[in-house]
Image: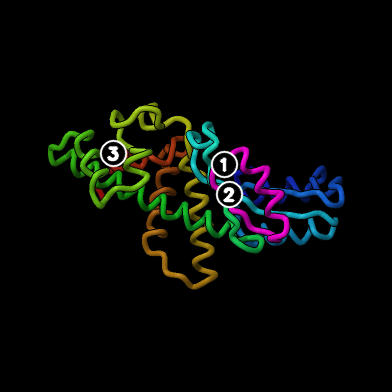
Amino acid sequence: MLPTSINAIEAYSGANGILKKVKKGSLLIDSSTIDPAVSKELAKEVEKMGAVFMDAPVSGGVGAARSRNLTFMVGGVEDEFAAAQELLGCMGSNVVYCGAVGTGQAAKICNNMLLAISMIGTAEAMNLGIRLGLDPKLLAKILNMSSGRCWSSDTYNPVPGVMDGVPSANNYQGGFGATLMAKDLGLAQDSATNTKSPILLGSLAHQIYRMMCAKGYSKKDFSSVFQFLREEETF
């Protein structure tokens, strides 16, 4: 599970890469979140060596990893899915077959684009409510019993002091970095361009996270968008 497409290519095709020594019949599972086209190319190279490649990006964050409740989105030869499921089931409660190689990446890219949009929306709503005089814990409670409820509001709230055990309670340390979210949104942007799909909010989310990275938030959890918005009063 590596951060970028370049890292994955190096791990497989580099001077000391996996493809130099992989045994025929091996099952190779890549849980990186990378360009679907890169997964497809790696699969072709692995197939030439007589092995099997499956992309299986993951969702759920640190908390789900600790409790073995991750979600794996798997792309590859369907006949090999049972073998992958047996391994991934040790770490995840949801192991979903998505289709051919690259479809796991497609599902993950769509999920993270939606996650970024919902986190920004949650941060904006919480910031507005606080400035209107609402107690943040009360506002979060109301949102989470109303139609605005989402994972970003009820499980990973971005406002310090609202929830325990999340990055916002620890100065946005740990969790899923803003740099990685910006990278995933870049993948969504590339995919949208290639498929001529309009992603108006996805594109805006990409720009927001790129700005965050440029202004010192790159190593903070992506929920620090709340802090970013609090500080940026010139929008």
Q: Are marks 3 and 1 in contact (CB under 8 Å)?
A: no
CA distance separating discs 3 and 1: 37 Å
**Could you tell me which quadrant the N terminus lies in?**
top right
The residue labelled by disc 3 is 231
Under circle 3, the secondary element is helix
Q: Amino acid at mark 2?
A: Val
Residue 72 appears left or right of 210: right
**Disc 2, SS:** strand
Residue that mark 2 sits on:
95
Q: Position of residue 209 (x, y in %)?
A: 42, 48
The image shows residue 68, relative to residue 33, as above or below, that is above
Residue under pointer 1: 92
Is residue 184 one of those drawn in magenta? no
Residue range of the region highlighted in magenta in the rendering: 73-94
CB-based contact (under 8 Å), mark 3 and mark 2: no
Mark 1 in CB contact with mark 2 (< 8 angstroms): yes
Ranked by sequence position, the earlier of labels 3 and 1 is: 1
What amino acid does circle 3 point to?
Glu
Image coordinates of residue 213 in percent, x first then y, are: 45, 43
Image quadrant of residue 198? bottom left
From the image, state whether disc 3 or disc 1 is nearer to you.
Answer: 1
What residue is shown at x 24% (from left), y 44% (from top)? 145
